[in-house]
Amino acid sequence: MNRLVLVIRHAEAEEPAHALIAGRSDAHRELTKDGRRKMRAGARGLAQVMENVDHLVSSPLVRAVQTADLLAEAFPDAKRQQHAGLSPGFSQPALMGWIARHKGTLALVGHEPDLSQWIGYMVTGEPRALVLMKKGACCCLEMPDSPLAGEAHIVWHMPLKHLRELAPEA
């Protein structure tokens, strides 16, 4: 049996230098006002393409959690979770194994370049970027419930701009 996994890069966050000036580390960088606005519309657009999301999982870094918060507005029934296995530098085989233990449609919110390399790993078996994951972009993968590297297929990929174009008016 196959299932869908949405791979989503966090929305636009404040620059690292601005966060440092404000006394925040990289892990505590927040989304910009514009990043929030665009991602909120993108989440509404994503809800036009996806009927439901069972699990909404983010890296514990603030910008990913805040992106997941905005996605949760569009998918209020999704079970929320933070997972350190989506933090920058994560292990690709470990994330694949973690996904195999969770049923249903997953939406994963994380960081670059890890996400694009993980997509490549799942599609080809090698950690290489196959898609450009701009901020707020979403890539939909179809894979077996218990996937192995190289068994996933890219169903579609949309940058945030296109997701926003699908959004109904707020």
Image: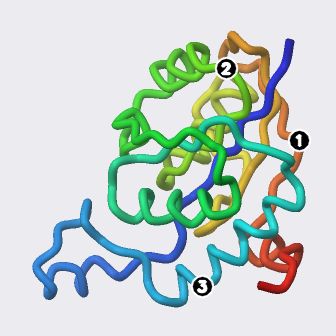
Q: State the image coordinates of residue 157 (x, y, percent, origin top left).
A: 81, 54
Q: Amino acid at mark 1?
A: Val
Q: Are marks 3 and 2 in contact (CB under 8 Å)?
A: no
- Give the number of callouts: 3
Q: Amino acid at mark 2?
A: Lys
Pointer 1 residue: 155
Query: Disc 1 vs disc 3: Cβ atoms closer than 8 Å?
Result: no
Quadrant location, the N terminus: top right
Is 53 in front, or is 163? Answer: 53
Residue beneath disc 2: 103
Mark 2 or 1, nearer chain start: 2
Extreme residue toward the left, this view: 23
Please give the name of the residue rendered at 87% of the width and 49% of the height, measured from the top-left corner: 156
From the image, state whether disc 2 or disc 1 is nearer to you.
2
* 3D distance between C-alphas at marks 3 and 2: 31 Å
Query: Is residue 83 depicted above or below 41 in this figure?
Result: above
Mark 3 neighbour density, 10 Å: few (under 14) some (14–19) many (20 or more): some
Q: CA distance from mark 1 to mark 3?
A: 26 Å
Residue 143 lies, in percent from the top left, at 78, 23
Give the labeled residue for mark 3: 37
Q: In the displayed structure, would residue 117 be above or below residue 2?
A: below
Q: Residue at x 84, y 85 (%)?
A: 169
Mark 1 or mark 3, earlier in chain: 3
- Residue 135, picture quadrant: bottom right
Q: Of circles 1 and 3, which is in front? A: 3
